[in-house]
Structure formats: C-alpha cells, structure tokens
Amino acid sequence: MVEVRYFAAIADAVGKDRENLEFPAGATVADLRTALSATYGPDLDEMLSVCAYLIGDELTRDPGVALSAQVDVLPPFAGG
C-alpha cells in the first residue's frame, strides 16, 4: 500500500489531498503516473509530467525511481 499525497493543482485535479493505492513491489514513479492517468484521465498525465515526487527524503522527477510507503506529488510552485 502506498499513501499518495497531492498538493496544489494536482489536489484540485484529482479532487482530494491523499489516497492509498496498491502497487506491486518494485513499482516506480512511472507506474504511479500510469495508474493516476488511467483513473483520472489522460489530461492528468501532462500535469504529472512536470511534477516532482518526494519519495522518502529524495525529491525526484525520474520515472524509474521506486515508490516507498508514502509519495508526495508536488506540482511546480510559483513565488518564493
């Protein structure tokens, strides 16, 4: 089970700030993106392609990174 937390525009697009999803061992960011696009529609994939993913202590955009028990999906933020 992976707890996926959504922030800002992604949370608005999926209509929630978190959910738990089942993935097999070794699933990756690419698998997460595929699952989310299948659930919420192909328009979400474009948004997900510019997101960063916080997995453990690692912030990544690499689709080959393995998922952990919690993943934060972070769209680009403006401001500072």
Image (cartoon, grey):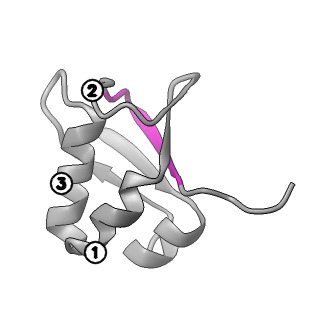
Look at discs 3 and 1 and give the one toward the viewer. 1
Q: Is residue 6 left or right of residue 21?
A: right
For the residue carrying disc 1, how many other residues have a C-alpha within 10 Å: few (<14), some (14-19), or many (20+)? few
Which circle marks residue 35 in the picture? 3
Which circle marks residue 43 in the picture? 1
**Which is nearer the N-term, disc 3 or disc 1?**
3
Q: Secondary structure at mark 3?
A: helix
In x, y percent, where is residue 17? 50, 64
- Looking at the rendered structure, the kind of residue marked 1 is Asp
Q: Nearer the viewer, residue 38 or 76?
A: 76
Q: Secondary structure at mark 1?
A: helix
**Which is nearer the N-term, disc 2 or disc 3?**
3
Tell me which segment is drawn in magenta.
67-74
At horizontal 27% and vertical 26% (from top left) the residue drawn is 64
Q: Is residue 33 above or below residue 41?
A: above
Q: Are marks 1 and 2 in contact (CB under 8 Å)?
A: no
